[in-house]
Amino acid sequence: MSRVLQYFDGGSICPFAQAAVRAPAGVVAVELEQLDDDEVLVSQLSAFTSATAAAIVLAPSDPASHAEARTLAGQLFGRLALACHQLNHPSATISRAKVLHDIQCAQADPVRHPLLDLHGSPLFTVAMGPAYPPAHPRYAPHLCVVMTWQFDVVRATLTHPKVVARIREAMRERTGTVYDAVSLYL
């Protein structure tokens, strides 16, 4: 878990990610040794509930370029879709190949952004990693996908609009762009 600890120790500058890591509800951290280790992913993600602030799933390796990172993040997203499907429908008989095929088709569509849900609640999923410059909001010391509950983001926006506006303005000043929490990989 040393790679996960680097993330928790401030290895990401994204203020939303830092807030999730510091949240009293806690974080589920999954460090994959193999991308296709579905049993480990499902087992560890079963602890990710609406009472948990976020889940961080670290890829088994760190790609050398953005192109490689985008590909690996997409593959990891597919595995997460499969894990969520298995957690949502534990007795379903649909094949893994079918779920992965469906998510790959959705990812290939330039207009749609596939979303995950867990136990009926939608999730934001963003990829972060070392291919980004350290000042970028998607920088992290290792390639990972961070999942947060959409209702937590909406709640924060509604209950603390000035704080969220300051965070977004700070990110705009630092990076020159508005942060996109919809796209898996920027």
Image (cartoon, rainbow, N blue to C red):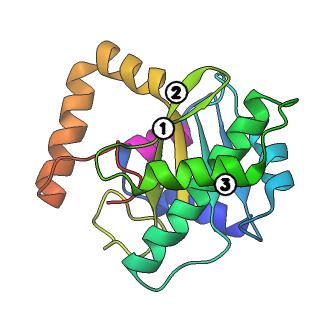
Query: How far across and how far down the image is residue 109, in percent?
Result: 36, 51
Instruction: Tell me whether circle 2 and circle 1 mark residues in contact (CB < 8 Å).
Output: yes
The residue nearer to you, when weighing 134 against 181, is 181
Q: Which mark is residue 122?
A: 2
The residue pinned by badge 1 equals 115
Q: Secondary structure at mark 1?
A: loop
Disc on res. 79: 3
Q: CA distance from mark 2 to mark 1?
A: 7 Å
Q: Is residue 19 magenta?
A: yes
Dot 3 or dot 1: first in sequence order is: 3
Mark 1: amino acid:
Leu
Which residue shows up at 48% across the image and 63% down it?
11
Q: Which residue is drawn at the image coordinates 46% and 73% (left, top)?
A: 69
Range drawn in magenta: 16-22
For the residue marked with disc 2, what is the amino acid?
A: Pro
Above or below residue 44? Residue 57 is below
